[in-house]
Amino acid sequence: MIQVIGLLTGKNLFVLLAKPFLKVKGAPTQAQELQRFNNMLAVIFLTLSLLSFLIQLPFLGYIFAAMLFLAAFAAICGYCIGCTVYFQYKQFKARRKLRM
């Protein structure tokens, strides 16, 4: 629910709560559009995982949950998979526009 609220409002509750404790001077911030895209991916994977469990496909549910876990772990280690997907999506969109 927190991720969905963040997706709808554009504000991430976890970030708002942690900001006073983790503030680093001069640290670069992500673009709002990129944050929304990453949040949307998280909501999609969590929803697909939940739906998989609801329709009695636990293996698929664990796969979607594991994919989100790996993306979060990679982000903690300094690599943003969502950022890479977003960049590729924008490149694809730009190439598609050029062809038309």
Image (cartoon, rainbow, N blue to C red):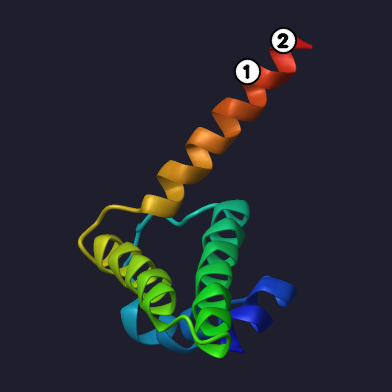
| Residue identifier under label 1 | 95
**Residue 40 position within the rendered picture, expressed as x and y whole percent measured from the top left:** 60, 64
Q: Nearer the viewer, residue 29 or 57?
A: 57
Q: Amino acid at mark 2?
A: Arg
Kindly give the residue lying farthest to the top in the view shown: 99
Q: Are marks 2 and 1 in contact (CB under 8 Å)?
A: yes
Q: Is residue 2 above or below residue 42?
A: below
| Residue identifier under label 2 | 99
Q: Amino acid at mark 1?
A: Arg
What residue is drawn where x is 72% and y is 10%? 99
Quadrant of the image occupied by residue 18? bottom left
What residue is drawn where x is 35% and y is 53%? 80
Q: Secondary structure at mark 2?
A: helix
**Residue 16 position within the rendered picture, expressed as x and y whole percent measured from the top left:** 52, 83
How many numbered circles does the render carry? 2
Kindly give the residue lying farthest to the front in the view shown: 56
Q: Nearer the viewer, residue 1 or 60?
A: 60
Res 70 label: none
Relative placement, left or right, of 33 versus 85 is right
Relative placement, left or right, of 22 versus 90 is left
Q: Secondary structure at mark 1?
A: helix
